[in-house]
Structures are given as C-alpha cells and as structure tokens.
C-alpha cells in the first residue's frame, strides 16, 4: 500500500488499457464470460497483461470487472466468485514484477435502492465477497470503475473497506456533456466521491478524451485528492460490420498530457485502447510534470441545495383533495385506443363526467399492447371534457432519464395524478420480440417521482419549482405470495406512494386480509372492481390475468347465466355486491368497463349510497407520503 501511494505522490501513474475489447480482438466471442477466462484460458489473459507491462504501464488491472456474484450468475458461475477473482489477481500478480496490480471492480448490473429492490446492504455484501477474493489473490489496490449511480459506488467502497484497507481509485462514467449518466455534474459527484474513504477519484469509459477533459477540469476545481482520467479510444464506429475505436495512439497521448496539465495524477485507457495507445501515453507522461493544486473551491452539492416546500398533498389535484376530505372516490378505467381517433373515448368520458365520476384511470400499454400514449389521451380528456385523469406510467418502455423527461412534460401539461406500475413484459403482448427496458421497477420510479416532488432530479440536481404529483401504486391483495406482495407494498409506501389501487378483487375476505396486514403502512386504498361480461370473460380473468382470482362460486354463477343479457346482469350484480362489501374498508373504487361499456360501470357505481359520495368531517388515519416529502 505504501508503495502505490508513494508513487502517486511523486509522479503521474499510468494505468493499462482495455481488457474486454482486447480479448474480443483476440477472438473471444461477446457471449463468453470474459472474467471466467482467468480459469479456463489463463495464458490468454496473461498475454494481455504482459503487453501492457511491455508498453510501460505502472498499473495493470485484473480481468475481474464483471466478476461479482450477480453477473457471474448470468453465466451459471455464481458459485465461482472466489475462484474467478482469486485467479484473476494471481495471474496479474504472476506477471507484474514491479508493476502494481489493481483489482478491477465494476457495477453489479442491477439497480439498487432507491431505484431497485436490491438493498444497499445486499450490494455491500456482494462487493465485499469479490474484494475479499481479490485481496487473497494479491492485489495492491482497487480500481472501482464505470459506475453511474452514486449510491452503488458508495456501496462498493463500503464493501471493499469491510475487508481491506488497500488504496481505492473510484471512477464514475460520463455522458458526452461531461455529466454522469444520471445527469450529475462532475463538481457534485467529484465532491461526493472525495468524501468517501478512497485515495483517488476520477472518470472512465463511455466517452473519448475530449469530453473527459472538461470533466477532469471541473473536478479539479473542487477535489483535493488525486484525479484519474481513463477515456475510451473515442466512440466505436461500425466498419465492415465490426465496432472499431478510431482514436489514434498519438491523439490519446496529446490528451493524456492535457489531463495532466488539468491536474490529473492518474492516466490510462478504457474501451478500445491497446498497448500501442499506452506506449504513446507513456511518452506523454514522461514529458509532463503534474500540476500542483493548492486551492479547492467548496461546492454545494445538489442534495444540499436550498430546501423547497413540497406542494401539500391535498392541493395536488381534485382527486387528492377529495380523498383528503374523506369522500369516497370513484374512477372508471378507460383503455387508450389502438389508433389515434379519440372520438368515442371523448363521448364516453363526457358521459362519465356528467354522471359524477371523479376520475378516469388510463392504463399504459396494458398486457404489453401498443396503444395511444396515456399522457396524450389524458391531456385531451382533461382539456376537452373537464374530467380528471389518473395516468398509469409503466417502467417497461423507457430508461430512467426518459421517464424523468416524460413526467416533467406531463406535469407541465397539467397532469397531476400518476399510478406507477412496473408493466407487463413484451412477451405477454402483441409484439413479443419487442425490447423491454425495465431500467427500474415501480419502487425505483416511485422514488424518482418523490424526488421530483421535492425539487430534485434523478441525479440529485435541483430542478427549481418542485412537481406536485399525487403518486399512486398498484397492489394485489390476492397475490399467491402475499408476504412478498406486502413487502413490496411497504417499499412503495417508503418510496413515496400516497394512494394505491388494487387489482380486481371479487371477495371481501381477500381485501380485508390484506388491509389487516398492512395497517402499519396504510395509505388510501382504492379497490378494483370488475363487472364480468360472460363466463368466458370470467375464465379469462381467472386464468390469464396475472394476480386475479375469480372464486369458484362466482365462476359457477357466471356459467349459469346462459345468455348474453343474463351474463351482463349477473356480472353487474356480482360487482355491486363486492363494491357494497368493500365500502366500509376502502377510500374509493376503480370500476373497470370491459369492452368499453361505460354504462356498465355506471350501473355498478349506483351501489354506492349518496351519503358516501359526500366529504366527511374526518378522515381515516393513514401514513401518506406527505410527511416523508418534508424530510430531506
């Protein structure tokens, strides 16, 4: 440890270049687990290490960037974490001689809290497992690289520090604008990294040297620790159906000198860089003297920005005001059309509005179907009909930044009620070969919207005036794994959900069982009510709609309704019975309108006594997200 830190204090330190793209150039297919080559083809990995040492690298990184339990498990190698990492460190140690060996640690490949269901503690444990094996194999330091989530890189540092006090160089990765992939400025993430128990901070991968230089310059203004810069050899370009990195060694060397002049103490290369690039950079390093930085400007991070006052929950929408007053609210589900013509939808919405329905609920690509944007439909309904909408927003089709852009736009257009759902996978829908994103799930997206309601974007940057979304979540009281469903419901409430809408429920006992077990996290509950249209519809709901259970007694009632008219009447009767039973226990009902039959939904709603539709003087105690949003 003393040797590396001493070297870093005395001179610019040169890291090696790419490992993954180099192995690919040497004939390893992309579907292989590159990290496993430490065990199955050590000679090939050794040859890459030797080439970088011969080029003049001061530090070589182990071939373990993706050798954590989660990534190895995708190749069926989850039980070989220790073997793969230990072998990777031993290979590098074997050829290193006087060259330092850095244990390469990359991200887990999943989202952790607050964006995903994996907890920080779980992430720390996974990183610790990998780090312990690298220490056992003989590394001199750690290079944490290509991270874009500050919460995850903090977990990586914590995991390593749980098993080792070796030096750590911590890197974030960038967009072309110089900010992190989540939009965090170098001044902000640089200061956050420097506050961790690490020995150097920096940036690597994703961009070429030109974009990285500006980030280094901006970090140098606020960071006193040594700064590392390890760019790609430009952006890959397709040449004869192969992705090639086209920055020349000479060009990379010019920028290495500029990194040093900007205050960099560590330089090297990432994707696309070769021993030739490192050899050229070696010459630039010899010719350059490191810049001494004697002053550091204190930067206020976005998380420490001036606090904003969230919009009170009861003032966010007519729906939130109604529920806060104790009114039993009724919404009706309206599917977006498959085309662009909203004439029938506008007519139906007008009928519902005139009948006193509080809101219409607009699904987002239900069962992975291709339909009109619920946002576009909602804007037209609110502006042309005057009825309030609750838009579903699913995580399937957009990444985190795209979802943030959409929701900021929705707020600007006047939409306020949003129900966050994970979404059905494409294989369930019309286009099973379509690509799903699922960058986050409904818990992660609820966290994001909660941040927007506190005036912060996904990167923690201030957005000015906070949004005022009334945030809902979905829940399934009839889930076959109720313990898991309740755990996820608790996480959604913790993330900021302020009301929930259930899957269609046909038995009051199912709903009451769920409510009894969730009293400690109670938020307003809107019960899903589905008027069955026929016995075939009942069978479909019971067998093909995830999370819905139609009891045998109801199936039998629908079976006995042997004509279309009788089936409709029986379906409405069953829905009215369920709604009447639910009334004392919930804050509202969402009534579905199978096949666009909105008159059916209105007939079901007639089961609600008029006095229940009027605001009461008191409301049930609940744990809404309002208090959470007051917290920093």
Image (cartoon, rainbow, N blue to C red):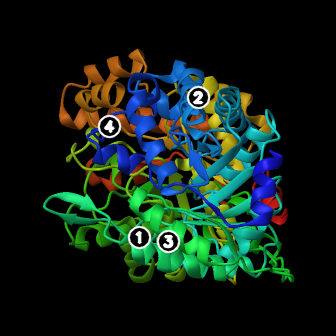
Considering depth in this image, is 220 or 396 the residue closer to the camera?
220
Where in the figure is residue 92, as x and y percent of width and height?
Answer: 56, 36
Where in the figure is residue 35, as x and y percent of width and height?
Answer: 46, 34
Identify the mark nearer the N-term, 4 or 2.
2
The residue where tag 4 is placed is 569
The residue where tag 2 is placed is 90
Identify the mark nearer the N-term, 1 or 2.
2
Horizontally, residue 302 falls left or right of residue 385, namely right
Q: Quadrant of the C terminus?
A: bottom right
* Foreground label between 4 and 3: 3
- Separation of disc 4 and disc 1 at Cα? 34 Å
Identify the mark nearer the N-term, 2 or 3.
2
Q: Is residue 605 visible?
A: no
Secondary structure under the numbered disc 1 in the rendered image: helix
* Foreground label between 1 and 2: 2
Q: Quadrant of the N terminus?
A: top right
Secondary structure under the numbered disc 4 in the rendered image: helix
* Foreground label between 2 and 3: 2
Secondary structure under the numbered disc 2 in the rendered image: helix
The residue where tag 1 is placed is 375
Q: Is residue 93 above or below residue 552?
A: below
Horizontally, residue 261 falls left or right of residue 246, namely right
- Separation of disc 2 and disc 3 at Cα? 34 Å
Secondary structure under the numbered disc 3 in the rendered image: loop
The residue where tag 3 is placed is 175
Q: Are marks 1 and 2 in contact (CB under 8 Å)?
A: no
């Amino acid at each position: 440890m003393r040797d590396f830190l001493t070297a870093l204090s005395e001179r610019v330190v040169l890291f090696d270049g790419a490992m993954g793209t180099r192995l690919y150039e040497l004939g390893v297919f992309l579907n292989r687990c590159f990290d496993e080559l430490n065990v199955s083809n050590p000679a090939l990995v050794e040859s890459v290490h030797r080439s970088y040492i011969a080029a003049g690298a001061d530090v070589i990184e182990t071939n373990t960037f993706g050798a954590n339990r989660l990534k190895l498990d995708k190749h069926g190698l989850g039980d070989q974490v220790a073997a793969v990492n230990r072998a990777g460190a031993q290979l590098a140690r074997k050829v290193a001689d006087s060259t330092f060996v850095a244990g390469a640690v990359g991200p887990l490949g999943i989202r952790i809290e607050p964006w995903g269901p994996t907890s920080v503690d779980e992430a720390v444990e996974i990183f610790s497992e990998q780090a312990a094996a690298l220490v056992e194999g003989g590394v001199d330091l750690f290079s944490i690289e290509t991270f874009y989530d500050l919460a995850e890189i903090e977990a990586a540092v914590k995991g390593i520090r749980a098993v080792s006090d070796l030096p750590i160089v911590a890197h974030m990765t960038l967009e072309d604008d110089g900010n992190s992939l989540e939009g965090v400025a170098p001044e902000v993430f640089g200061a956050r990294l420097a506050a961790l128990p690490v020995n150097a901070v920096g940036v690597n991968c994703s961009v070429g040297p030109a974009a990285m230089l500006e980030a280094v310059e901006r970090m140098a203004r606020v960071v006193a620790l040594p700064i590392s810069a390890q760019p790609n050899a430009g952006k890959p370009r397709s040449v004869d159906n192969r992705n090639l990195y086209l920055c020349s060694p000479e060009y990379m060397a010019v920028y290495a000198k500029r990194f040093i002049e900007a205050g960099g103490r560590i330089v090297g290369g990432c994707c696309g860089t070769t021993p030739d690039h490192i050899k050229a950079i070696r010459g630039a390093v010899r010719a350059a003297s490191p810049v001494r930085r004697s002053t550091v400007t204190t930067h206020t991070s976005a998380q420490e920005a001036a606090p904003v006052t969230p919009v009170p929950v009861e003032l966010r929408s007519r729906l939130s005001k109604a529920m806060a007053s104790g009114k039993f609210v009724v919404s009706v589900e309206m599917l977006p059309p498959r085309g662009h013509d909203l004439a029938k939808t506008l007519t139906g919405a007008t009928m519902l509005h005139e009948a006193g329905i509080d809101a219409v609920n607009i699904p987002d690509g239900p069962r992975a179907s291709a339909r009109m944007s619920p946002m576009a439909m909602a804007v037209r309904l609110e502006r042309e009909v005057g009825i309030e909408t609750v838009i579903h927003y699913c995580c399937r089709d957009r990444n985190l930044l795209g979802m943030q852009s959409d929701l900021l736009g929705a707020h600007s257009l006047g939409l306020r009620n949003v129900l966050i759902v994970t979404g059905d996978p494409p294989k369930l829908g019309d286009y099973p070969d379509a690509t799903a994103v699922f960058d986050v799930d409904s818990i992660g997206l609820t966290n994001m919207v909660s941040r927007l309601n506190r005036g912060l974007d996904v990167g923690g940057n201030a957005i000015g005036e906070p949004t005022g979304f009334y945030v809902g979540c979905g829940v399934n009281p009839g889930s076959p794994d109720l313990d898991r469903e309740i755990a996820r419901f608790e996480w959604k409430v913790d993330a900021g959900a302020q009301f929930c809408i259930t899957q269609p429920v046909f038995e009051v006992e199912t709903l009451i069982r769920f409510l009894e077990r969730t009293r400690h996290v109670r938020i307003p509950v809107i019960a899903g009510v589905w008027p069955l249209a026929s016995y075939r519809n009942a069978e479909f709901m019971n067998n093909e709609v995830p999370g819905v259970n139609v009891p045998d007694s109801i199936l039998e009632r629908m079976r006995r309704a042997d004509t279309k008219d009788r089936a409709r009447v029986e379906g409405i009767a069953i829905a009215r019975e369920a709604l009447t039973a639910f009334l004392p226990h919930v804050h509202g009902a969402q009534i579905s309108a199978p096949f666009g039959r909105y008159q059916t939904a209105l007939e079901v709603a007639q089961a609600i006594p008029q006095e229940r539709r009027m605001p009461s003087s008191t409301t049930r105690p609940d744990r809404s997200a309002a208090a959470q949003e007051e917290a920093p």
